[in-house]
Image (tube, rainbow, N blue to C red):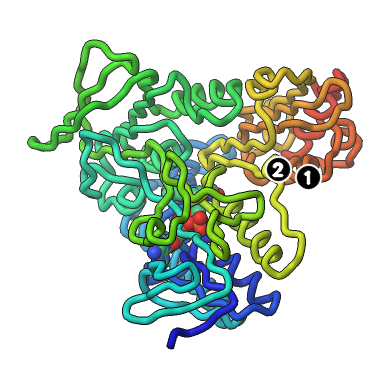
Amino acid sequence: MSDQFDLIVIGAGPGGYVCAIRAAQLGMKVACVEKRATLGGTCLNVGCIPSKALLQSSENYHAVRHDFAAHGVIAGDVRFDLPKMMGHKDEVVTANTRGVEFLFKKNKVTWLKGEARFKTADTITVGTESYTARSIVIATGSESVPLPGVAIDETRIVTSTGAIALTQVPHHLVVIGGGYIGLELGSVWRRLGAEVTVVEFLDRLVPTMDGEIATAFQKILTKSGMKFRLGTKVTKADTAGEGVVLTLEPAAGGTPETLTADVVLVAIGRRAHTENLGLDAIGVTTDARGRVVTDAHFATNVKGIYAIGDVIAGPMLAHKAEEEGVALAEILAGQAGHVNYGAIPGVVYTWPEIASVGQTEEELKAAGIAYKVGKFPFMANGRARAMGDTDGFVKLLSDKATDRLLGAHIIGPDAGTIIAELVMAIEFGASAEDVARTSHAHPTLNEAVKEAALAVDGRALHI
Ligand SMILES: Cc1cc2nc3c(=O)[nH]c(=O)nc-3n(C[C@H](O)[C@H](O)[C@H](O)COP(=O)(O)OP(=O)(O)OC[C@H]3O[C@@H](n4cnc5c(N)ncnc54)[C@H](O)[C@@H]3O)c2cc1C
């Protein structure tokens, strides 16, 4: 006889664990299956959290060496201790994953340890045990996309998981892929002294972000010493010798050349993870990219089976997965759960950071929507000057006829935190004028947002 639950969630990443907790809060008897030894999924174990710990540590080192003198702070012989830095990262990960374990206990969510596989539409197996539930949620996340001809060994040719655990600073790190994961981890190792070359198939970085922001971003990263080979593809990696010899070609094909690295990070994207789940046996539909197909209420084509997070369509972001987890739990409890995909921010945690919400200028043009633009540079913001962090700008896009905010794009210090007020503005359907008429504390970086909102109407005050 199998154990019975109201809800079984497969996968304890930000989508799955949040869904489990919210469902338990709403009175359901919930189990969450996780095959990893710790809870928290990709995000807490090998993604968001460890990468941000290393970004912070390496940024601290970089700031002491390069930025403190301008503030009159003279540091002596500044060095770093890589094992200690990695130890700090591991401690942060442990504190976070244990935190989820605590939350499961607090909310009486049963953690089923092991790999789940569908037996029937309402029953899964974990090891030799079977468990039945009225609803089952697939929240199995994603994995790195492999690159043909470039075999991962997680030592010399690594995914992001290997790149957050290198035991020494590479002399030359080649990052394949100019998306946020490659650029964040490339920044970490660049700050610690590696030569970093980014090879990108497209002719621009961060392809989903606003084009003007991407151009400014590339300039700033180039200033930091990062090198770029855009419009270029990697066709082969030869590991026979001491270094890894990559064969590069123009994206459209052409004369090959070689580039030697001691470590290669493959960061060309992530794909839905559904291996060994037994989806075929129960007939759950997946799309051409392997993602589980769902309707607007996260239901798959099989009654009682739902999916959320990286395993379904949409941006592969932890907070998107969390929103879906909460919305689905509420829908299952008979409430009106909903996710506003137009108000999901995206952040690149380099320095300066990039943050974006809503539509880009390219998207508005393609959709034929008439818009107004307001921009304000951090160079003209008092707080940014005091910090010595004047690179970048805020760019707001509003509807030409109604002034409703359609998009917000920031490159600059702490952009990932600044963007929150614009996410809120878009969520509430605010106009640029609403933001412009809101009092912003002085002197703060957020004043650049107010000024950009004023600039939409051609009346910025401090430029
Ligand atoms: C290096 C890196 C940095 C990132 N940084 C950010 C960031 O700064 N901000 C951001 O928003 N996002 C970031 N992301 C993306 C973020 O990690 C994902 O969007 C998020 O983790 C998706 O959550 P999820 O719950 O859908 O899946 P996941 O977090 O992938 O969790 C899925 C879980 O399911 C488990 N699982 C899979 N199959 C089974 C099975 N059959 N049985 C039991 N368990 C199973 C897996 O072990 C895993 O723990 C980053 C990702 C990487 C790789």
Relative image position of residue 440 (x, y in whole percent) = 84, 42
Q: Is mark 2 within 8 Å of ligand 1?
A: no
Estimate how packed mark 2 is, as few (under 14), some (14 to 19) or many (20 or more) residues with alpha carbons within 10 Å: many
Label 1 near ligand 1 (CB < 8 Å): no
Image position, residue 37 (x, y; %): 37, 71
Q: Specify the amino acid type for callout 2.
A: Ala
Q: Nearer the viewer, residue 367 or 383?
A: 367
In the rendered view, tell whether residue 276 sits above or below residue 454.
below
Q: Secondary structure at mark 2?
A: helix
Q: Which corner quadrant of the image does residue 423 belong to? A: top right
Q: Is 73 placed left or right of 420 in the picture?
A: left
Q: Nearer the viewer, residue 207 or 413?
A: 207
Residue 204 shows which numbered tag?
none
Q: Quick check: 238 left or right of 278?
A: left
Which residue extends farthest bottom? 1
Query: What secondary structure is marked by label 1?
Result: helix
Residue 364 in the image: above or below residue 87? above
Residue 219 percent location from the top left of the image: 50, 22
Give residue 83's quadrant in the image.
bottom left
Q: Which residue is mark 1?
A: 427
Q: Nearer the viewer, residue 78 or 213?
A: 213
Calculate the distance from the C-alpha at mark 1 to the C-alpha at mark 2.
6 Å
**Which mark is first along the chain, 2 or 1?**
2
Q: Residue at x 28, y 45 (%)?
A: 158
Q: In the displayed orientation, state which residue is furthest to the top.
A: 254
Pointers 1 and 2 in contact (CB under 8 A)? yes
Q: Amino acid at mark 1?
A: Glu
Give the residue displayed 59% in from the left and 56% down from the top: 299
Q: Is residue 407 left or right of residue 454?
A: left
Q: Which residue is mark 2?
A: 343
Name the image quarter holding the N terminus. Answer: bottom left
For the residue carrying disc 1, how many other residues have a C-alpha within 10 Å: few (<14), some (14-19), or many (20+)? some
